[in-house]
Amino acid sequence: MTDMLFMWDDSFLIGIEELDHEHKGLIDDINKLHQELTGNNDRSEIKRCLGEIYVRMEAHFALEERVMKVHEYEYFNEHKREHDDLLESFTECMMQFLNGADISSKNPIEECLRQWVVDHITTSDKKMSLLVQERVAHSTDSWP
């Protein structure tokens, strides 16, 4: 993959293996979408990529929320609100494209995804992970 929006590196790791694995898969999917958008390939392939990202984001957020609930993460509501806002923002951008927006509309889609990867994973998810791991280390809790 030569044309990537994100190059995976350890700065994206949050320290919860299953969530890190999902983050890496989502970044791979985002890079596939980026290739389709910049290559101006057919709309059906872009539509497929968008759908895959949406499904993976939704499933990933559900898993992350489960981890937070199981470990009684004190900032759960705030973190879930971020998930809801990110999914809503991505859905709006995706729907604009699916409703006929020009392929040049890649910037809002990619900006939404960049916000999720850069802002959410590297800040909110890392904060959550540190507090959850600390809780697990000081209790009889285990990973779900």
Image (cartoon, rainbow, N blue to C red):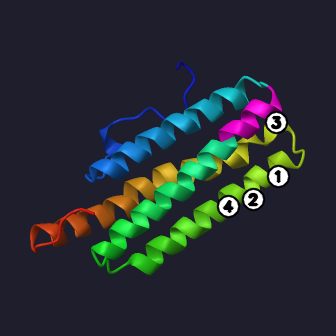
Residue in view at x 27 percent, y 53 percent: 16
Residue in view at x 52 percent, y 69 percent: 82
Residue extent of the magenta highlight: 42-49
Q: Which mark is residue 96?
A: 1
User: Secondary structure under badge 4?
Assistant: helix
Distance from Cα at disc 2 to Cα at disc 3: 15 Å
| 101 on left or right of 52 | right
Residue in view at x 49 percent, y 72 percent: 80
User: Pointer 4 and pointer 2: residues touching (CB < 8 Å)?
Assistant: yes
| 138 on left or right of 124 | left
User: Secondary structure under badge 2?
Assistant: helix
Q: What residue would you read off at disc 2?
A: 92
Decide if residue 26 is in sight here: yes
Q: Please provide percent x and percent y for residue 2.
A: 54, 18
**Between discs 3 and 4, the one toward the N terminus:** 4
User: Secondary structure under badge 1?
Assistant: helix
Vertically, is 134 above or below 11?
Answer: below
Q: Which kind of residue does numbered mark 4 sit on?
A: Ser
Q: What residue would you read off at disc 4?
A: 89
Distance from Cα at disc 4 to Cα at disc 2: 5 Å
